[in-house]
Image: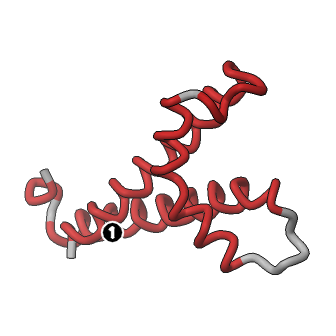
């Protein structure tokens, strides 16, 4: 169970860092961000999460806000995985969690 929780936590961290990097690179690149190779790579990494957020959100939410919803969903998954990992580590002992 600890391995499964750690995998969810790691995937959430990778996606969160990819979204943060994409946002920062979008600010730096400006209007030509869609032509940037690294921006496109980060966009490929975050596309599954953003697509899932589009499926979950109602149609009232405009497409421009869907990445924010995806980011908040990832933060909630990360928090849940972190709390679960702490709970499991307290139950089995901290020495076994390393």
Q: Identify the residue at horizontal 9%, vertical 54% (top origin).
A: 95
Above or below 28: residue 38:
below
**Viewer-proximal residue, 24 or 2?**
24
Residue 37 appears at what percent x and percent y? 50, 30
**Image quadrant in which you'd find residue 32:** top right
**Viewer-proximal residue, 81 or 59?**
59
Q: Answer left or right for 18 relative to 68.
A: left
Residue 1 appears at what percent x and percent y? 21, 76
Circle 1 is placed at which residue position?
A: 87
Which color scheme does this rendered protein use? secondary structure
| Residue found farthest to the front | 35
Above or below 21: residue 84:
below
Q: Answer left or right for 93 relative to 83.
A: left
**Viewer-proximal residue, 85 or 61?**
61
Query: What secondary structure is found at the residue carrying circle 1?
Result: helix
Q: Identify the residue at horizontal 9%, vertical 59% (top origin).
A: 96
| Residue found farthest to the right | 60
Q: Residues within 10 Å of mark 1 (few under 14, many from 20)?
A: few
**Image quadrant in which you'd find residue 58:** bottom right
Q: Answer left or right for 9 relative to 3.
A: right
**Viewer-proximal residue, 14 or 9?**
14
Q: Identify the residue at horizontal 46%, vertical 50% (top origin).
A: 45
Residue 87 appears at what percent x and percent y? 33, 68
Q: Identify the residue at horizontal 28%, vertical 62% (top origin).
A: 7
Above or below 22: residue 27:
above
């Amino acid at each position: 169970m600890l391995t499964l929780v750690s995998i969810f936590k790691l995937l959430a961290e990778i996606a969160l860092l990819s979204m943060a990097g994409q946002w920062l690179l979008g600010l730096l690149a400006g209007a030509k961000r869609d032509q940037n190779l690294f921006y496109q790579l980060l966009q490929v990494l975050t596309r599954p999460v953003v697509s899932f957020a589009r499926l979950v959100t109602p149609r009232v939410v405009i497409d421009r806000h869907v990445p924010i919803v995806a980011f908040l969903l990832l933060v909630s998954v990360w928090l849940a995985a972190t709390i679960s990992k702490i709970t499991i580590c307290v139950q089995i002992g901290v020495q076994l969690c390393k």
